[in-house]
Image (tube, grey):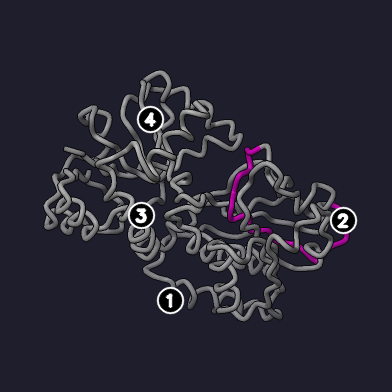
């Protein structure tokens, strides 16, 4: 029997989950055994999983799970260097030149396990079957606007946290922007036609921020793109890959510009293809903005688990997208799982 083991997330500020109780019930009805770990942080309560018929395991007990179990989580595993003998479904961040990804692949190679990377679960046309993109863009734009508002106060963005829902986030942010007394900034979104860019643009428009929307047609020239510097905010919603243009080069730090706040929602600072090479590390919930220039000022927001600011909405949305693929776990040789395994084999 196929056995899916939903592990607890171990990263700080990570409350999302890729399977809802309703989805778990559907898997069990399809003949898939489901184990869900206890979690001190998961946004969706454990009782729903119990009622759905899931088996319950202690938090972070997945290393001792049966070797035939498929371990399902979202964010990174603890970086303890241990070999990984299981099959894992997760975001590995290991295939695009990320330097930390090499260590993860070495762990899989040492243990004989397999990574089914959630970013590489694609249909026959190459489109991802599930993504957190919309809520990443939405939350990323919100924190970037918070960064801009802090600049108007002469400071840097303070810590951010979890919201009960988007209405609570919007109300707080609107009050924060109004309190600056400044005219709303102008923003440019690159990748505006995708899920991430749509979320970013929706948040900006909800806040009364004028948005310039660019996508592949506007960036096909490969740059440079001086128009970006004419805006107050730049929201990068394009994931780094070979051939991605540089949108904000290092020379921009000392150039004449209106741009003071960058939201790198895609957040690939350690990739060789980083299109925003003015910074070199992700930011955190405790320190959301990294100051990369002071005259004139420029701050970069690059939090890599933005959707967890809205964990219930983002979990429900993502889980609904992913469930049809989880229902095909009984045959890992075909479809999205076969393609994800081939991608892993190519890189490992």
Q: Which residue is pictured at 55% across the width and 72% down the height?
A: 203
For residue 167, which numbered disc appears in the image? 1
Q: Viewer-nearest of labels 1 and 4?
A: 4
Mark 2 secondary-structure assignment: loop
Q: Which contiguous range is marked in magenta?
A: 254-271
Magenta includes 325? no
Q: Mark 3 points at which residue?
A: 322
Above or below, comparing residue 37 to residue 161 in the picture: above
In the picture, residue 153 is in which quadrant?
A: bottom right
Q: How far apart are marks 1 and 3 (CA)?
A: 25 Å
Magenta includes 261? yes
* In the image, farthest residue toward the top: 110
Mark 3 secondary-structure assignment: helix
Q: Name the residue under label 4.
A: 114
Q: Are marks 2 and 4 in contact (CB under 8 Å)?
A: no
User: N-terminal of the two: label 4 or label 3?
Assistant: 4
User: N-terminal of the two: label 1 or label 2?
Assistant: 1
For residue 3, which numbered disc appears in the image? none
Judge the density around disc 4: few (<14), some (14-19), many (≥20) Cα neighbours within 10 Å. many
Q: Do the residues labelled 2 and 3 touch (CB within 8 Å)?
A: no
- Please state which of residues 31 and 106 is positioned toward the viewer in this rendering: 31
Q: Distance between the residues labelled 2 and 4?
A: 46 Å
């Amino acid at each position: 029997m196929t056995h899916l083991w939903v592990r607890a997330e171990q990263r700080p500020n990570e409350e999302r989950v890729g399977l809802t109780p309703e989805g778990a019930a559907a898997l069990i009805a399809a003949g898939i055994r489901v184990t869900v770990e206890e979690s001190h942080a998961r946004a969706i309560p454990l009782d729903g999983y119990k009622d759905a018929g899931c088996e319950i395991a202690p938090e972070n007990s997945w290393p001792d799970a049966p070797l035939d179990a498929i371990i399902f989580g979202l964010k990174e595993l603890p970086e303890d260097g241990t070999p990984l003998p299981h099959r894992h479904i997760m975001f590995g961040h290991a295939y695009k030149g990320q330097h930390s990804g090499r260590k993860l692949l070495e762990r899989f190679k040492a243990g004989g396990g397999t990574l089914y990377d959630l970013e590489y679960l694609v249909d026959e046309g190459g489109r991802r079957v599930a993504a957190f993109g919309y809520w990443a863009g939405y939350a990323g734009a919100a924190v970037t606007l918070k960064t801009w508002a802090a600049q108007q106060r002469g400071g840097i963005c303070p810590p951010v946290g979890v919201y009960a829902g988007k209405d609570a986030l919007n109300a707080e942010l609107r009050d924060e922007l109004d309190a600056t007394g400044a005219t709303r900034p102008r923003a440019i979104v690159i990748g505006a036609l995708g899920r991430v860019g749509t979320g970013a643009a929706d948040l900006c428009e909800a806040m009364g921020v004028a948005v310039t929307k660019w996508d592949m047609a506007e960036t096909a020239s490969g740059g440079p793109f001086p128009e970006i510097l004419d805006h107050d905010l730049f929201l990068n919603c394009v994931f780094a890959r070979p051939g991605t243009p540089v949108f904000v080069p290092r020379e921009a730090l000392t150039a004449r510009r209106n741009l003071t706040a960058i939201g790198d929602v895609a957040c690939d600072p350690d990739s060789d293809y980083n299109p925003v090479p003015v910074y070199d590390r992700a930011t955190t919930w405790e320190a959301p903005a990294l100051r990369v220039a002071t005259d004139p000022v420029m701050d970069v927001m690059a939090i890599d688990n933005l959707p967890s600011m809205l964990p219930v909405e983002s979990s429900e949305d993502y889980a609904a997208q992913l469930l049809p693929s989880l229902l095909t776990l009984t045959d890992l040789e075909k479809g999205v799982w076969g393609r994800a395994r081939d991608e892993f084999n190519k890189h490992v």
